[in-house]
Each structure stands twice: as C-alpha cells, then as structure tokens.
Image (cartoon, grey):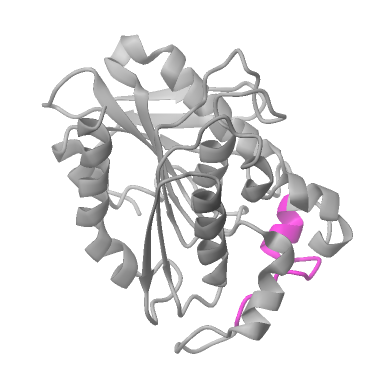
Amino acid sequence: MTDGTIRPDTTLAYGRTSPNQVLDLYLPGTGARPRPVVVALHGGAFRLGNRTWELGALPALLRAGWAVASVEYRLSPEARFPAAVQDVTQAVALLKARAQEWSLDPDLVVAWGRSAGGYLATMLGVTGGRRTEFGSSGDDASVAGVVAFDAPSDFLVMDRQTAEHPPEGGEGPVQGHDAPDSPESRFLGAPIQEVPDIAARANPVSYLASAPSLPPFFLAVGTGDRLIPHQQTLALAEALRAHGAAVTLRVIEGALHADPAVELPLTGAVLTWLQGLRSGR
C-alpha cells in the first residue's frame, strides 16, 4: 500500500546491476536509539510491484519507534530466480553494514512481507547470515524475525494442495501454478514441474536442516485464499517448528489473499509480537 503523506528520509542504491536495486528508508522521529528496523518487501506475484506497495503499517511502525526500509527488487520479467532473493539479501546486508549512519540496530532487523514479499522475507529468515548462493558469509544479512502473510513456499505442491483442499468461500478462478506462464514458473524461468532442482533451491524448507539457528516467525493466512493455497503456510509453520523455530501462526477462516480482514486486525498483534522481540533482547 502507498502512504501519501510520509516521505522517506533517504533513498539508497544497494546494488549496481539494476535501477530497481534501491530502498527507501523511513526513520521514526522519536524513540530509543539505536532504532530497530522492519524491512518491508512488497508482493506482486514476483512480476509486479514496487517499494511503495508495502507501506500499510508504516505509520504504526514509525509511531512505535521502528525504522522501515522498503525494498525494491528485480522482478521476473527482468531477472529470474535467484535474483530477487539475492537482492533482498544484499539490501539487508547494506543496512546492517551502514547501521551506524542512521542509528539503526543491526541486531534487530525484521523482514516483513506479503505474498511474494512474504516468500522473500521467509528466505531471508532461513538463509541469512551464512554463505549461500544468495549472499556471502562475509556480509551479514541475518534477520531477528520474520513476518509473512499469505506466502508461498513449496511451489511444486501448490496445485495438488488446491485440488485436495479447495479454498473456502469466495468467487472467481483459482490460480494455477504448474502452467508455463504461472507466476512461479516465470520466477524460476521454466515450468516448475520441469525444473524440480531449481524449485528445491527456491524452497525455504530446503535450508532448514543446515541453518545454525532460526529467528522467530509470525505467519498469517486466510483459508479462502484463491491465489496461494493456505496449506503452504501451514506446511511451512510445521517445518519451521520441527527445526526449532518459534512460530506464531494465525489462520483466518474464509479470508482471501491479501485480505484486509487478515492484515488490518493483525497489525496490532504483529506490533505486540515485534515489541516482544525488542524487549526480549
């Protein structure tokens, strides 16, 4: 969402490969320093959107003393996987490396996103802080927490999950994912069922067993989601818990994809959860 009244304090380029490798940094006017940071990652099926799309909670976050870095990244028409994951990893690494310039707390950076942005936030949570194809071990891109709404995770089973458990309520078509022109196929650069090795590399669960530690996760989804089967979130929560992560899971009966009925009532709950991370340090 775009907030029309709050302007960023600075805009930073975190990469040189694309003009889309930029972020807007918003700083709270009051509050303790160093400031904790929310990294906001927009959705848009990996092919649409920009850094103004994930600002619905910006005013509340600033009032609570959180800085917000809203990140733009390369979309699938420009660059396929792993480009977007590499971009958000590089953005977090830049913020942490230059935290002192803006009085940011490099140890309290939380990734927040919905849909494709929720996927990217999850990837940061399971890969940050160690050497992967997304970033080097010399650059600290670890996050202290993840907030993900309506996020995909295991692309290969999405159509099967929808067939076995259709979304509850709602009208209109259900998004397919195996087709060559699906968002996930375009993101990976080929029909997903034809590139299971790439799909495995794109699956957050693939990184859990080797993760030295996992941050806490706040996951939310609606059972009426017609774009991303809500079982994606349920399976991710189960896998995270099996590997020792603390997971707060909110499942909203009948809610749709990117539904204000999910996100708006949960803003307060997420802020409370964030405050718990802050006070628990």
From which residue to which does the magenta span run? 174-187
Q: Is residue 58 above or below residue 86?
A: below
Q: Quadrant of the C terminus?
A: top left
Q: Is residue 77 above or below residue 221?
A: above
Residue 95 falls left or right of residue 243? left
Residue 167 falls left or right of residue 16? left
Residue 273 visible somewhere in the drawing = yes
Along the line of sight, the residue nearer the viewer: 140 or 45: 140
In percent of width and height, residue 38 lies at 34, 36
Secondary structure predominantly adopted by residues drawn in magenta: loop
Which residue corresponds to the image point at 62% horizontal and 54% vertical from the top-left? 47
Q: Quadrant of the N terminus?
A: bottom left
Which residue corresponds to the image point at 76% horizontal and 50% vertical from the top-left? 200
Identity of the residue furthest to the right in this view:
194
Along the line of sight, the residue nearer the viewer: 112 or 204: 204
Along the line of sight, the residue nearer the viewer: 239 or 170: 239
In percent of width and height, residue 210 lies at 66, 35
Identity of the residue furthest to the left in this view:
30
Which residue corresponds to the image point at 39% horizontal and 31% vertical from the top-left? 24
Which residue corresponds to the image point at 61% horizontal and 56% vertical from the top-left? 153
Residue 228 visible somewhere in the drawing = no
Tell me if residue 182 is in the magenta stretch: yes
In percent of width and height, residue 83 lies at 68, 37
Q: Is residue 166 above or below residue 85?
A: below
Tell me if residue 115 is in the magenta stretch: no
In percent of width and height, residue 270 lies at 27, 51
Residue 98 falls left or right of residue 115? left
